[in-house]
Amino acid sequence: MIQLEHITKTYPVGDGLTVLNDACLTVDDGEYVGILGPSGSGKSTMLHIMGLLDRPTSGRLIFNNREVNALDDRELSMLRGRLVGFVFQSFHLVPQLSVSENVELPLFYQGVPRSQRRERARKALAQVGMSSRMRHVPSQLSGGERQRTAIARALVTEPALVLADEPTGNLDSRTGGDIVELLNALHAEGRTIVMITHDREIAATLPRVVQIRDGKLEEG
């Protein structure tokens, strides 16, 4: 599914800030991988590169059996829209839109007809236990319900890969546990999932964990 070959990411800060340094990682189709590390260790940068939101400074990225380094921004956007679903720590829901409308947004940008958008949003919300809240707006939801909505939005395009960036970071421990269980269930259905976390207890429950240290990746 994803292959990172000697990925380096350096930002033009001062003499140059290297966040990723010769990082190598392979994620196979159907895997569930946790990436563990403290804040500022480069976890989110790596996730953005894996999800085609950012480009590496050097190294090779193979995504779904395709080398993507040479693709232009439009081609990356199209590939990302079809194959990747994102779940963020801060939810990123549009406050003026209903739960259903938030979930429909990726399909709207893909030009999917309205009736199909609604039906696919309904199914995605049912999958995450949010059918009864479809007409509510984000301010009427709990933190856990907002994250479930965000997960439904990630699933509505039927992506090959789900990338979750600290999905429990803004939730209490009990609600965070519910979200982890939901992601576990999605993996059991065959989804490929990569989760960024700084929580060792959550990481200990995952089938495979990669730690990031000094911009490099280490198994276990």
Image: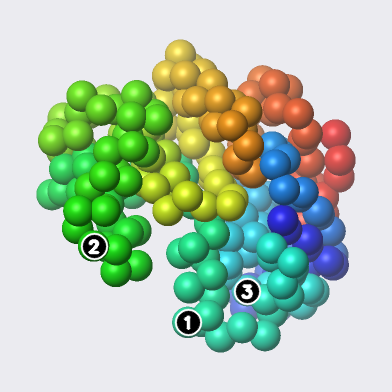
Q: Residue at x 64, y 60 (%)?
A: 50
Q: Determine which residue is flagged by label 3.
A: 55
Which of the two marks, 3 or 1, is nearer to us in this view?
Answer: 1
Mark 3, other Cα within 10 Å: few <14 / some 14–19 / many ≥20:
many
Q: Quadrant of residue 6?
A: bottom right
Q: Is residue 120 left or right of residue 65?
A: left
Q: Nearer the viewer, residue 23 or 115?
A: 115
Q: CA distance from mark 2 to mark 1?
A: 22 Å
Name the outermost residue toward the top. Answer: 174
Q: Earlier in the sequence, mark 3 or mark 2?
A: 3
Q: Quadrant of residue 52?
A: bottom right
Mark 1, other Cα within 10 Å: few <14 / some 14–19 / many ≥20:
few
**In this rendering, does residue 180 appear at all?**
no
Which of the two marks, 3 or 2, is nearer to us in this view?
Answer: 2
Q: Determine which residue is flagged by label 1.
A: 74
Looking at the rendered structure, the kind of residue marked 3 is Arg
Looking at the rendered structure, which numbered label has been put on residue 113? 2
Q: Is residue 65 left or right of residue 52?
A: right
